[in-house]
Amino acid sequence: MMRSKWVISALIVAVLGAGAWFTLRREVAPAGSKAPIATPSISIPPEVEAFKKAPPVTRVQDFYESESKRIGAVDPDPKLTQARLELVAAELSPDEVKWLAGTALNAKENGDGRFFATYLLALGRSVEGTAALRQIALTEIPKRKNKGLEELERQIRAQATEGLGRSCDVAGARDALLDIVEMQLDEFIRDRAHRALYQCRTGKPVEAQDKEALDKLLYKK
């Protein structure tokens, strides 16, 4: 009975937490160092043009500050926002990937910002980004007296793991997920990795798997 309650709780957290924070819809591209980003049917936003011209690292720090503040606010044009993030993520340099990974694991940063840094890494769909997501997902979850803060750490790692599942056509992503299954001590993160691998094999998003599992638990006869 306790096991069943734990599974239900974990699935609810998964549906409402990391997997539901942002939803990606992308076409599968050939494996390689960096998968191509589909050209949006809109003009390139001025923020992206400015990002391309700005010096590396400083530009991603500024972009992080401005974009992470928008989280939770009403978005008048989600498609434009998604296109802007994808275009910026495609420009990330290795040093910027490293900075975002460090930010995602920095407990002094706010939770929304850390989720955003992890999400942007997944959008970049590069070998460097894949390695960074692997690092985040495999980092041990610190024990905290405040269980809410401990759960935040778990969800950030889950976000990284699910990001790998959405980028499984990028070189190294599947191997990273297998490493998480084998090496991550946290049961919930290992479950995320299993589901992400299933997404790689079948194309069924982790979010859809969670919903199906939750429906079976809640509405079984």
Image (cartoon, rainbow, N blue to C red):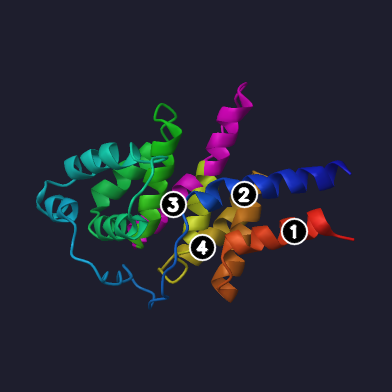
Q: In which quarter of the image is the C terminus?
A: bottom right
Viewer-closest of 190 and 120? 120
Tag 3–tag 2 contact (CB < 8 Å): no
Question: Looking at the image, is mark 3 or mark 4 earlier in the sequence?
Answer: 3
Q: Which one is in front in this view, the residue at disc 3 or the one at disc 2?
A: 2
Question: Looking at the image, is mark 1 or mark 2 earlier in the sequence?
Answer: 2
Height in image: 189 above or below 179?
above
Q: Which one is in front in this view, the residue at disc 3 or the one at disc 4?
A: 4
Question: Looking at the image, is mark 3 or mark 2 earlier in the sequence?
Answer: 2
Q: What stretch is highlighted in magenta?
A: 126-155
Q: What residue type is labelled 2?
A: Ala
Q: What residue type is labelled 4?
A: Gly
Q: How crowded is mark 2: few (under 14 residues within 10 Å), some or many (20 or more)?
A: many
Q: Marks 3/1: CA distance? A: 29 Å
Name the residue carrying label 3. Answer: 133
Dominant secondary structure, magenta: helix
Q: Which residue lies furthest to the bottom in this view?
A: 30
Tag 4–tag 1 contact (CB < 8 Å): no
Q: Where is residue 17 in the image (x, y as percent from the top left)?
A: 57, 45
Name the residue carrying label 1. Answer: 215
Q: Marks 3/4: CA distance? A: 11 Å
**Magenta segment: does it hold 153?**
yes
Q: Which residue lies furthest to the left in this view?
A: 53
Height in image: 109 above or below 55?
above
* Residue under the point 48% across and 59% down: 164
Q: Marks 3/2: CA distance? A: 18 Å
Residue 138 shows up from this direction: no
Question: Looking at the image, is mark 3 or mark 1 earlier in the sequence?
Answer: 3
Q: What residue type is labelled 3?
A: Leu
Residue 14, which numbered label?
2
Name the residue carrying label 4. Answer: 165
Q: Is mark 2 on a helix, strand or loop?
A: helix
